[in-house]
Image (cartoon, rainbow, N blue to C red):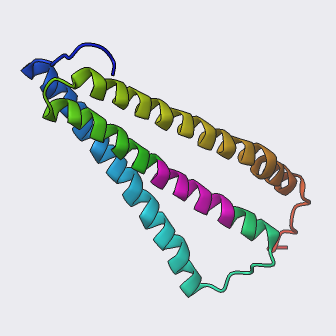
Amino acid sequence: MYGQKYEFDDKQNEIILKVATRMSWAGLLFIIYGIINLLAYFSAFLVIEPDFSDTEFLMELVYEVAVTLMYIVIGMLTLSVAKYFKLIHGTDGEDITHLMDAFLSLAKLKMVEVVLFAMVILYILAYKIPFVIKMLSAPALPDATM
């Protein structure tokens, strides 16, 4: 598909396998972090009675769940990229094809990261910063020691 067959030597294969292994661990940790966060958010509902009529609470909840899901998606895509790098190490004669597939998968991962983080930044700019400014400009509460 990408030209003539090529095979990386043993030293190059070990480097590629090291990259794949580290990417697999990173992807797995992203997923675990996301799952733990989701469990923490939903278990908090067992302890408190959330006020779903509170717009600020809902916005914060949507933000936190969306960011958590972002970590899970990034983790899954990272595992997908790692799979292609592992194929380079584990097959013969198709190294360039697998390398190109790995680069295509990596490009998709990076595009998803850009879009997701851009959405988070837009949310922060549109909601969190105005909220902080509103809170800072609110009149101070009277001192209780008086």
Rendered position, 132 above or below 9:
below
Q: How many marks?
A: 0
Q: Quadrant of the N terminus?
A: top left
Q: Is residue 90 placed above or below 116 in the rendered structure? A: above
Q: Which residues are magenta?
A: 61-73
Left/right placement of residue 86 relative to residue 132 reads left
The answer to whether residue 7 is left or right of residue 48 is left
Q: Position of residue 24 (x, y in %)?
A: 29, 44
Residue 8 picture location, percent across and down: 15, 18
Using the image as rendered, state which of residue 8 and residue 2 is in the foreground: 2
In the orientation shown, which residue stands out farthest toward the top? 4
Q: Quadrant of the C terminus?
A: bottom right
Q: Main secondary structure of the magenta part?
A: helix
Residue 5, magenta (yes or no): no
Classify residue 97 by image quadrant.
Answer: top left
Residue farthest left in this picture: 10
- The answer to whether residue 67 is magenta is yes
Residue 124 in the image: x percent, y percent? Answer: 72, 47
Q: Using the image as rendered, state which of residue 44 and residue 132 is in the foreground.
A: 44
Residue 4 image-quadrant placement: top left
Q: Is residue 40 above or below residue 92?
A: below
> Does 93 sit left or right of 69 as displayed?
left
The residue lying furthest to the right in this view is: 139
Please give the name of the residue rendered at 22% of the width and 37% of the height, measured from the top-left corner: 86
Residue at position x 74%, y 42% in the image: 122
Residue 145 image point, x, y percent: 80, 73
Residue ID at (87%, 54%): 134
